[in-house]
Amino acid sequence: MDKLIVHGGSTLKGSVNISGSKNASLPILAASLLTDQDCIIRRVPDVSDTNYMIQILSALGADVERSSGTVRISCKEVADTAPYELVRRMRASICVMGPLLARLGRAVVSLPGGCVIGDRPVDLHLRGMEALGAKIEIEGGNITLTAKKGLKGANINLSGSHGPTVLGTDNVMMAATLAKGTTVIEGAAAEPEVVDLADFLNAMGAKIEGAGTRRITIEGVSSLHGVEHTVIPDRIEAGTFMAAAALAGDHVVLRRVCREHLAAITAAIEASGHKVEFNKTGTQCTIIRGNKLKGVDLETAPYPGYPTDMQAQMTALLATTPGISVIKDTIFPQRFMHCAELKRMGADIKIDHGTAVVRGVKRLTAAPVMASDLRASAALVLAGLTAKGSTTISRLYHIDRGYEHIDEKLLTLGAEVERVKE
Ligand code: EPU
């Protein structure tokens, strides 16, 4: 296991390239199961979650080659059972369910277990599959879905008590591409990653309209073909570097971003007193650290709202921003594990019913801290950048799940970070 030592106090300068989106890559990789022809997917980030997905696809019979961000997948023969040993490592493995069911009429996937950021049920995924005509059995920790005569288009409402489901929308959309007739998903997730998946599926020959809105219509087709696709930029990685640059930077430039996808994050960073300037095409931005900083009130919400995946990093930024900030996570109300660690570094944070009240302190002080999930670990790295002394973040494997070479990127910007074996 690796740990990261962050020596606080350096000023970040220069530019960094943002990688392809992890959360777009995962369902897109899974979607290649829908065809027996070759799919070529570019800008897949080299992070452990995409590696897990590739291992799952290989275990299902896919032939996969990967070289510097490009993944070529050929799924001539596909098995219907995703092995528990691989699936249990990553919740997003659930998105092989839709493609397997659509292609084979049967899928066996483990039921995901507990998760540190919240309960994370899959009832909405199953509701969708059932509406498409699948029979569902849960036994021995596995979900078995069967549709002997194939899937049939249906009207499905996928909104749950915490709003729409991203991977649930992906799963149902993928299953419906090969169903007979028309499927309408109401209450669909509108995240850019869902749109990227729909673009990928449409390029394979699917007929999907409305991705990016709350209502998606899918007209089933009889088969899908191979495709080449480039994954969208990772808006959460970009947001994390925006927060790092606001905390400790001097005109840091982020390249290969998408301005539109970053609107809510940009608004939050600017509300706290910093400036974000985009180039004309919106593909590059410069973060200018402000000198009149203030606390902000934030509430996470489905896209285009403020993303829950940027809640922890913003909390780290606001921990040393003068004034009081109130941060509410409506999507994952228990996602505040990072706060206990930030408090060990001197942050003044009170958590109550899914809301963090942060009173900005002048400076944090370094401490040994523990990463609890992907975004929490990013928050601790950010906190370490300006803390007094050297912060040691253990359980770094959490950050390696979703940030491509984060230590190298920070070093490029002039941060003093060291990856060491525990
Ligand atoms: N929910 C249900 N039932 C379901 C599915 C979800 O009640 O069947 C609830 C969840 O418990 C949660 C809300 O609906 O309260 C939204 O969850 P969603 O299903 O949208 O989450 P997800 O699709 O499993 C993706 C991202 C997460 C991100 C969430 C929310 C991927 C691979 N994962 O998860 O990303 O937090 O959407 O935006 O796309 C991360 O990258 O760090 C991460 C956790």
Image (cartoon, grey):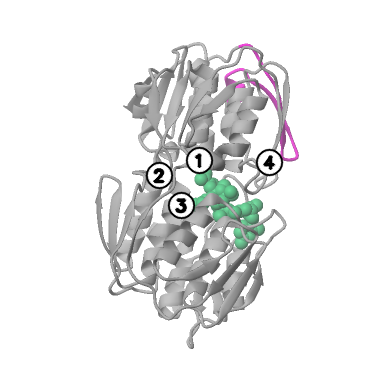
Q: Nearer the viewer, residue 358 or 210?
A: 210
Q: Position of residue 188 (x, y in %)?
A: 63, 61
Question: Dot 4: what SS?
Answer: loop
Please tell me in which quadrant of the rendered image residue 290 appears: top right
Mark on residue 20? 2
Q: Which residue is mark 1?
A: 235
Disc 4 Cβ-to-ligand 1 distance below 8 Å: no
Q: Residue at x 51, y 32 (%)?
A: 240
Residue type at mark 3: give it: Ala
Question: Dot 1: what SS?
Answer: helix
Start-end of magenta stretch: 342-362
Image position of 63 (left or right of 319): left
Give the distance between the C-alpha atoms of the residues marked 4 and 3, in whole angstroms.
Answer: 22 Å
Residue type at mark 2: give it: Gly
Image position of 364 (left or right of 392): right
Image position of 115 (left or right of 40): right
Q: Nearer the viewer, residue 111 or 180?
A: 180
Q: Which residue is mark 3?
A: 24
Mark on residue 171? none
Q: Which numbered disc flags the more N-terminal residue, 2 or 4?
A: 2
